[in-house]
Structure formats: C-alpha cells, structure tokens
Amino acid sequence: MNSGRIGYNNAAERRLVRVSIAMLALVTSLGCAPESTTHVDSRSVGTLEDVFALQERDDLNVVFILIDTLRADRISSYGYDRNTSPRIDALAESGVRFNRHLAQSSWTKCSMASMWTGLYPSRSGVLRSRHALPESALLPAEIFREAGYRTTGIFRNGWVARNFGFAQGFEMYMMPTTPKDLVVQSANDPASIAASDGDVIRAATGFLRSHSKDPFFLYLHLLDVHQYSSDDTSAVFGTTYSDIYDNSILWTDSMIGHLLDEIQNQGIRDRTIVVVASDHGEAFGEHDKDGHAYDVYGEVTQVPFLISFPFRLEKGIVVDSPSENVDIWPTLLELIGLSPLEDPDGTSLLPAVESAALGQPSPDEGTLNFAQLDHTWGRLDGEPDPIVSVTEDRWRLIYQSSESESQLFDKQVDPGEQVNVASEEPEIVSALTEQVETYLGRDKPPWPDEAVSVEIDEMELHQLRALGYGVQ
C-alpha cells in the first residue's frame, strides 16, 4: 500500500513493537487490561437549564481529550457500523455531540494553533514546520490559570511541543515516557515513538490523585490512533490498514474508559466537564492518498467534537448545524463563565446547542466554514501554496492557489466529495472563490506579534519524521 508520506509503512512495520509497549505500559500503569464490562454512570440527571447554569459554578474541572488523527465517521455515535467507541459514545448519548464538525487543517500544528487561539490559519500565521505561536498570543490555559485553576498538559505529538508556543499557561507541560524496563527500541530507529497513550493515562491518573480537590484544567493529547497502535484484546476488526486504524480507536476508547473510571473513583465526576475532540482525520484512498497533511478533503477535516457535563442528560443533544474547531474554546469558556479569547474567528456554539435541544432552527445556518493547509508546509524555502476549503450550506469549494481550477462539491448529494461539479455551477464557484480570497487577506492576529519561526534540532526532526511527516 502506497502511503504517500515518509514513514507510514515503516510505522506499520514497527506496529508489533509498539503494540507490546502499549499493552505493557497500560497494564503496568493501571494494573489491568482494557475490559468490556458495563460501567455504571453515577451522575445525576440534568437539564438544559443546568447546562446554562454551569457558568455560575466555581467548582468545575475541565478534562480536554484530544485524540490525534481521529475522523468522525469511524466513531459509532457518528454512524459507523463497527462498535469502535463504546465509552466515547456513552459520553455523547448523555451530553452534546456536534454532528458536522470541521477541523481547520489536516496537519496537527496548524490545526492545533487554530483550535487553541480560535483563529483561522490565515490569521494565526502558524502554517509551516518552523512556525510557532508568539508569547503574546492568549491561549485558554492562560485564562484558566488566571482564574485560579491548576493547569496541566500531557502530550505525545511533537508538533505541539513547548518550543512551538503551546505550553503557555500550563503549570506543567510534559511529554511522558515509557518506563525504561518496558522500552523496546530498534538500534536502527533511535527516534521511534516508544511511549504509548497508556503513559498519558498513567500520568493523568497521578495528576488526578494529587489534585482532585483543586479546580483544574487537564489537557491530554493522545497519539495511538495516529500511530495505529492497539493491544491484542482490541485487535478485533481485521488486519488491513483501515482495520488496524479501527482497532486503535477501540484501544484508545478503552483507555479513555480507564480515565473516566478514575475520575469517578476520585468522586469528582459530578463537577468535571469532559471534552473529546480531534485535530484532523485520516485518508484511506478516498482521493488517491493515504494519511493526512496533503489536502483538506472531508476525510481529513471532518472530526468529532462532544461535551460531557457533570450530570447526564436523559436524551443527548445532537447539533446538526455546522461547527468548527475554532468554535471549541469560545464555547467552553462561555460555558464555564471564564473570560473569552481575544477577537476569535470562532463563536460560541451554545445558541446552537439550545436550538438543537428545543428543536428550533439553528441561528448559525448560512455561515462560512474554512480549512487550510499550506502545500509546502514541510519545506524550509519555497513560496506559500495555500489549499483552502470553504463550506457554505450544501456547497464546498476546494481552492489551491497553484491550480488553475477549483473543485466544487455538493455535500447534500455527494457527502464523500467524489463528483466535481465546478463546471456546472460557475456562479457558485465565483462567489466562493471570492470568499476564499477575502479569507486569505484577513486581518492579522489580535496580539502584537505575528507567528515566529523557531529552529528544530536534529532529534526533534527525527521524532517528527518518526510520526510519518516528511519534514525537510
């Protein structure tokens, strides 16, 4: 199978090593393997009024779980016919699920910069491999810390490392490692990713046991889905790349289950908001490519977003109106009554949540949604070559500055974006192209400094290449 990106096949060949590490790390860390038992939800029943009353509370915790490379249509609650995500689905069934959610890029650093700042890539300025957020950027962790929360981030993807500006506001910001006696690492592959998401959960468990009495913001960035890692008990769907991807989702779901059980065991579930999101999806040949960070088609930009409250709703809320990752933090900060981001492009989704719960039309229909990738993001030199998608109602335009013609898809009849109807709808193409040009010329970010460029040392380059990225 031709992956189209450096390291993908090597990653597959290293899978057995990572599977052993992941399984041993989780068993050692948590004292048990993933289970398929039924878990009791002890939360009381809440209402829509309780959702909007959360901003009046001063005892809330927020656990923000970012599952790297998770596309929405591989989750059962988003309509997938395989049972890949029972614990995530349970959160959705008693909380809020956003059904048409879009990431701002198909590459982690660009996407995460937009998520944390609420700015589209054209304004965040984080578009290339050496770009970093400046210190003057305001991030959610800074808002939490200013409000008196304990703030901790535990991550495994080097694209969100401290040197790229993502640690701002976190008291502790760490990349966990596997215990030395569990590390199996090839001498020919010194930059392989040895730790697993089990190590993230182990570190998070330690944090919860130390800080359960303090209001906290805990960010967990999981990577095993990106790495196609799982253990033998969750490898139930087959052996193709697509099957292995599903196996890794089930494995990651089981680890999220361990985290949720720990939150409940600590007696803090009734004051903890749990959020699940993703930075981008993954392609399996839908547009002749596998992997991600090549384009902005739906398979790499349609991602899950759900919110689970300190109480359970008798009937979960499904928001069918469009939403984006730039909307996540405007929504969460308003939900818990904290100060907003600075001049974000995203907006709070709470009005859409209310409309969905009441069965009323969404107030956001007809809005524009954008995703962007610089086609030359991994190169040191070369002119920018932006690929931009703009979505308005049923139409989605894919624009690339280096191509003479854009692609237009009618999402209403062609959700998989397989039939280009640009030649049949020239007026729509013209109108949406004008929107893209306006988007690319938008104002600079609201902080004094633009994105900065940082040096990446050789070890960091090796680690990023081990993730499968062809960084030059």
Image (tube, rainbow, N blue to C red):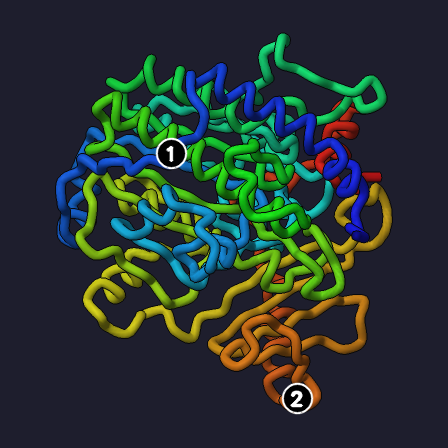
Numbered mark located on residue 257 in the image: 1
Q: Please tell me how crowded label 2 is: few (under 14), some (14-19), or many (20+) other residues with Cα within 10 Å.
A: few
For marks 1 and 2, the one nearer the N-term is: 1
Outermost top residue: 181
How far across and down, in percent of the image, does residue 462 sit?
A: 78, 28
Q: Which residue is mark 2?
A: 426
How far across and down, in percent of the image, does residue 11 sit?
A: 74, 36
> What whole-number distance in Å separates the C-alpha atoms at marks 1 and 2?
49 Å
Q: Secondary structure at mark 1?
A: helix
Q: Is residue 232 visible?
A: yes
Closer to us: 350 or 433: 350
Give the residue drawn at x 64%, y 37%: 227
> What's the residue type where badge 2 is placed?
Pro
How far across and down, in percent of the image, does residue 213 sit?
A: 24, 18
Give the residue drawn at x 33%, y 50%: 92
Vertical order, 250 against 395 (above or below): above
Closer to us: 171 or 467: 467
Q: Is residue 448 visible?
A: no
Closer to us: 89 or 367: 89
Q: Is residue 64 left or right of residue 441?
A: left
